[in-house]
Amino acid sequence: MRRARIEPLLLTLAGTVLIVLAGAVWISQRSRFPAEPSLSEDCSAAIAVESDAPDLTLTSLAGEQVTLEGLRGSTVLLNTWATWCPPCRDELPALEAVARRFADRGLVVVGVNIGESASAVQSFVDRSGLTFPIWLDPGEASLRAFATISLPSTFLIDPAGLVRARWFGATCERELEAAILPILEAWETP
């Protein structure tokens, strides 16, 4: 009878020891490697491309019909995003920063919200303090037009309507600036 009571106790003790050892091994291995970089330290790099920007007609957050063609003559940074997407939300401050920094040099940043209602997007934009234009894409036309399923995705379009760079996944200010500046400089009149 005594043996019947000791065996479950030994099994419990052995299980506890294994859990403690596994935790110690995990902690020691984790400390050997640096923490994963944050978005501010590491971000998606631009992929250089040269293709015609697609035709795209959507609705602005204000309810007006807008087209990508209507921005011809400006350098455009078009970003597809959604409020429920953490990487999208993480990169919005970088988009806002470049929108403000380069607006006087002809950069237009456009955020294309994928699949959400105007009221939900407006509420999010108001809370986030975004000032760049927001277009609504309830049917995901922009994703098809740019041949992507990734959120966020960002496309840099020169004033002639050529897509010059694209990012899949969240990027950061330094990567955006590195791609934007050469386009702006190439199109500035001396």
Image (spheres, rainbow, N blue to C red):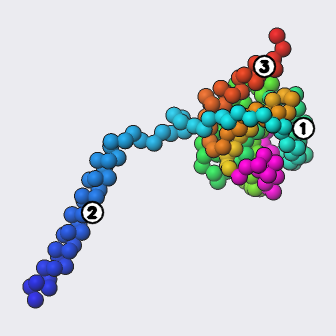
**Picture disc at residue 69:** 1
| Residue type, mark 2 in image | Ile
| Quadrant into which the N terminus falls | bottom left
| Quadrant into which the C terminus falls | top right
Magenta segment, which residues? 132-149
For residue 45, what is the image quadrant?
A: top right
**Picture disc at residue 19:** 2
For residue 87, side relative to residue 137 (left or right): left
For residue 128, what is the image quadrant?
A: top right
Q: Which residue is drawn at the image coordinates 33% and 42% (left, top)?
A: 32
As measured in the structure, the alpha-carbon distance from the residue carrying label 3 to the one carrying label 1 is: 20 Å
Q: Which residue is drawn at the image coordinates 28% and 58% (left, top)?
A: 22
At label 1, counting other C-alpha atoms closer than 10 Å, the crowd grade (few under 14, some 14-19, many 20 or more) is some
Say which label, 3 or 1, has the lower sequence index.
Answer: 1
| Residue type, mark 1 in image | Glu
As measured in the structure, the alpha-carbon distance from the residue carrying label 2 to the one carrying label 1 is: 61 Å
At label 2, counting other C-alpha atoms closer than 10 Å, the crowd grade (few under 14, some 14-19, many 20 or more) is few
> Picture coordinates of residue 14 (x, y %)?
20, 69
> Picture coordinates of residue 127 (x, y %)?
66, 44
> Picture coordinates of residue 153 (x, y %)?
69, 44
Q: Which residue is drawn at the image coordinates 67% and 49% (left, top)?
A: 151
Residue placed furthest toward the top: 190
